[in-house]
Amino acid sequence: MLTVEKVDSLNDPRLAPYRTMRRQFDHWRQEIFVAEGAKVVWRLLASDIQVLSVLMPEAALEEFETVLKSRPEPIVAFTAAKPVLEELTGFQLYQGILALAKIPGPATLHALLSIPATGRLFVALDGLSNAENLGAVIRNCVAFGVQGLILNETCAPPYLRRAVRNSMGTIFKLPYVRAGALPTALHELQKAGIRTIAAHPHTKETSIWQTDFSGDCCLVFGSEGFGISSPVLAACNEAVAIPMQKGTDSLNVASASAVFLSELQRQKKL
């Protein structure tokens, strides 16, 4: 059911999440998130995630009205001129199309392992704290067919506003697990016959071009500043590096994940 309301007061309490978009961790604690931009909102509406409201110019609402009316949950569509939207949010908006939704709960490791698939592929992240980097990694995961994401307790939440934005809404397609102890989760994967491969730029043993990525595997990536922690590295079956020119320490984690996943998919198609 869709209800359309023109914004007549910026102090309307229902608009509070849009006024506080910079406080994304507060939103995470409230189990809500804001989706930004037409493409991300379209992908949200194509998912089964519960949508609470949308906020956009009246002209833009005409494009979304049919799909909004087809949704099973009650949704309020707030409309206002773009300058009013920018005053409300405190952002300069390119499109002025926003949506508020409930954060879906995480999956369990058991549920990930139960996904029927030929060639299971997961990605695990150790301490990735930057939401923009996390969103870019998620986008790479979906692009290259990853079936599930495993995050340890020090990773940024995947439904922070900036992570959702940088993923371009692809997070809506990717099940995720919050693993308290990542080494324990990796051991569980290994028991299920899944190789755990650490992306470790400082290893001299094996390069990505020498690695056989056939079979079930989980690629493990570390944090921006410190890489993979020693306990997590020790829990992996092997460590693999991307060969680089001398004097280059490492790639950004999003770039590294794209290189690894691209090579993995290239091998699968041989």
Image: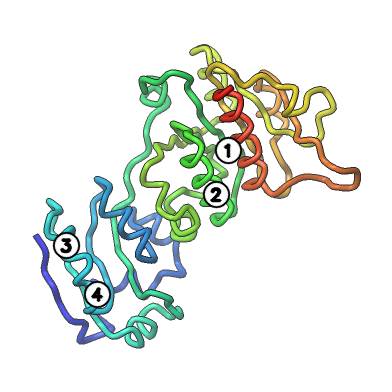
Q: Is residue 166 above or below residue 58?
A: above
Location of residue 109 (image quadrant): top left
Closer to the chain start, of discs 1 and 4, is: 4
Callouts 1 and 4 close, C-beta under 8 Å: no
Callouts 2 and 1 close, C-beta under 8 Å: yes
Q: Cα distance, mark 4 to mark 2?
A: 31 Å
Q: Is residue 91 left or right of residue 97?
A: right
Tag 1 secondary structure: strand
Kindly identify which numbered label has been placed on residue 134.
2
Kindly identify which numbered label has been placed on residue 75.
3
Which quadrant, please, contains the N terminus? bottom left
Check disc 4: other Cα within 10 Å, few if <14, some if 14-19, many if 20+.
Answer: few
The type of residue carrying mark 3 is Ile
Location of residue 174 (image quadrant): top left
For disc 1, the marked residue is 125
The type of residue carrying mark 4 is Pro
Which quadrant, please, contains the C terminus? top right
Which tag is nearer the camera, tag 4 or tag 3?
3
Kindly identify which numbered label has been placed on residue 219.
none
Q: Is residue 6 left or right of residue 233?
A: left
Q: Position of residue 149 (x, y in %)?
A: 48, 36
Closer to the chain start, of discs 2 and 1, is: 1
